[in-house]
Image: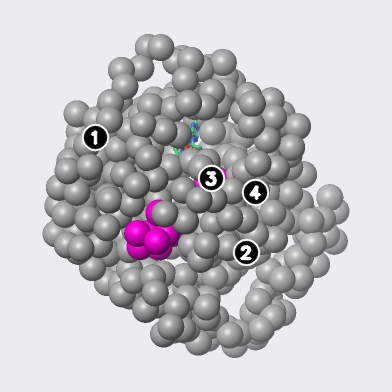
């Protein structure tokens, strides 16, 4: 990629942002701004932005921070994640929860346990609860619906589900129960790489699930892993293009971390700089998406959360799973979640955020897009 490509990609974003770039507009106002900065970025532009050295990348980071501030504001949303089961029927080559990992002690939390943990998290101040598990069909859609209803009955929180691939009918049951959002990462936009890494699964199948979730009115989250073996900068550009095509309300973009009990044990972890660049370019391409500074990023580098928040991120997902189970939800080893207290480390996070001049959001942090801000739509999902 030439310097020209880089300069023209940066110019496109700057032009769309405007010369005065007003500070932190209210999300509902910014949602109607047109054109959005990333709308005109082509795949070649995205490659040019990703394929940068240490100096140019500072320009990308600063621009992403500006776009984040302009469209999403300074507040950081905390989403408390409960990992309620580490059983999984899938066999993803990179994941410690894969079916063939016989070394992992498996657990399942009961619905009552989940509700107790969620109530505690809500009392600690979380305004979104994320329920995540391996693809575990022991829980029927009705069981997950009972978790959602139970949480919604007792706390004014949004609920995000991240329970993998299910049928449209099952997703409908979960949505009907009041689930607001669903997170299903596409992992990689390269169909061949997808097939190699996910035995028995296809990118097409993943996208079909995402289409059902969209149709059913969930706020949809997807995302990808940085540094998978066989991935190129072009693949990463396709990931960001796909996220834009899907018009996701959130995107989890974090580095690959090798797990010793998987076929990818000897592969190197994702690169820190590329992980930050991918996050920053995603912010440029998706100004209105919620983007977490991921736990994987914070596991890769002790200052990862802070770095992510300075490169376009506006969300943190602290882990509130009871400690006895948390250590068994080993997607990859050494997660920073293992060093956090039962409440996910809210006090420490507040201190870190205040040193960055970033307040903790007091709202549920729904998507700022107009369709989610309209009163009718808000009424049928949940309170802001
Ligand atoms: N079963 C659900 C699903 O597939 O969406 C949610 C659980 S899955 C373990 C959550 C995420 O963990 C995946 O989307 C994947 O991106 C991430 N993950 C798994 N193994 C990883 C690894 N070794 N490094 C980084 N991320 C990993």
**Magenta residue check for 27:** no
| Mark 3–mark 1 distance (CA, rounded to whole Å) | 23 Å
Label 1 sits on a secondary structure element that is loop
**For discs 3 and 1, the disc positioned in front in the rendered view:** 3
Q: Secondary structure at mark 4?
A: helix
Q: Residue at x 42, y 54 (%)?
A: 173
Q: Name the mark on residue 109.
A: 1
**Which numbered circle lies on residue 167?**
3
* Circle nearer the N terminus (3, 4): 3
On the question of residue 168 being in view, the answer is: yes
Give residue 218's position: percent from left, percent from top: 48, 62
**SS for dot 3:** loop
Q: Earlier in the sequence, mark 1 or mark 4?
A: 1
Q: Residue 370's x, y, as percent?
A: 52, 81
Q: Earlier in the sequence, mark 2 or mark 1?
A: 1
Residue 237 x %, y %: 72, 50
Q: Secondary structure at mark 2?
A: loop
Whether residue 266 is situated above or below residue 226 in the rendered picture: above
In this view, the residue in front, 55 or 239, is 239
- Horizontal side, residue 140 vs residue 47: left or right: left
Q: Which residues are magenta?
A: 174-185
Q: Residue at x 62, y 43 (%)?
A: 206
**Residue 268, percent from left and from top:** 58, 24
Q: Residue at label 2?
A: 247
């Amino acid at each position: 990629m030439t310097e020209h490509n880089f300069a023209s990609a940066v110019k496109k974003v700057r032009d769309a942002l405007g010369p005065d770039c007003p500070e932190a507009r209210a999300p509902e106002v910014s949602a109607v701004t047109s054109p959005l900065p990333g709308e005109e970025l082509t795949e070649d532009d995205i490659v040019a932005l990703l394929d940068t050295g240490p100096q140019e990348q500072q320009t990308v980071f600063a621009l992403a921070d500006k776009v984040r501030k302009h469209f999403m504001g300074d507040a950081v949303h905390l989403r408390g994640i409960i990992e309620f089961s580490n059983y999984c029927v899938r066999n993803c080559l990179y994941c410690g929860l894969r079916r063939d990992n016989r070394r992992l002690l498996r657990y399942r939390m009961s619905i009552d346990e989940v509700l107790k943990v969620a109530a505690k998290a809500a009392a600690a101040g979380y305004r979104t609860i994320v329920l995540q598990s391996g693809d575990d069909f022991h829980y029927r859609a009705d069981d997950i619906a009972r978790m959602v209803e139970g949480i919604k009955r007792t706390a004014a929180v949004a609920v995000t589900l991240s329970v993998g691939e299910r049928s449209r009918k099952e997703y409908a049951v979960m949505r009907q129960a009041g689930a607001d959002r669903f997170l299903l990462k596409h992992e990689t936009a390269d169909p061949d790489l997808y097939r190699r890494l996910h035995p028995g699964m296809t990118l097409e199948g993943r996208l079909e699930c995402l289409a059902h979730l969209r149709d059913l009115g969930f706020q949809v989250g997807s995302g990808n892993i940085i540094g998978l073996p066989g991935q190129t900068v072009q693949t990463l550009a396709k990931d960001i293009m796909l996220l834009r095509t899907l018009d996701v309300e959130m995107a989890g973009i974090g580095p690959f971390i090798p797990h010793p009990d998987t076929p990818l044990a000897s592969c190197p972890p994702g690169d820190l700089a590329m992980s930050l660049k991918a996050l920053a370019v995603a912010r440029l391409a998706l100004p209105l998406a919620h983007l977490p500074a991921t736990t994987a990023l914070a596991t890769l580098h002790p200052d990862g959360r802070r770095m992510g928040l300075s490169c376009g991120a506006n969300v943190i997902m602290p882990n509130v799973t009871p400690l006895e189970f948390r250590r068994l939800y080993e997607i990859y080893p050494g997660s920073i979640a293992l060093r956090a207290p039962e409440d996910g480390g809210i006090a420490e996070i507040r201190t870190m955020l205040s040193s960055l001049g970033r307040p903790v959001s007091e709202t549920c942090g729904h998507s700022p897009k107009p369709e989610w801000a309209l009163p009718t739509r808000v009424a049928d999902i949940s309170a802001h």
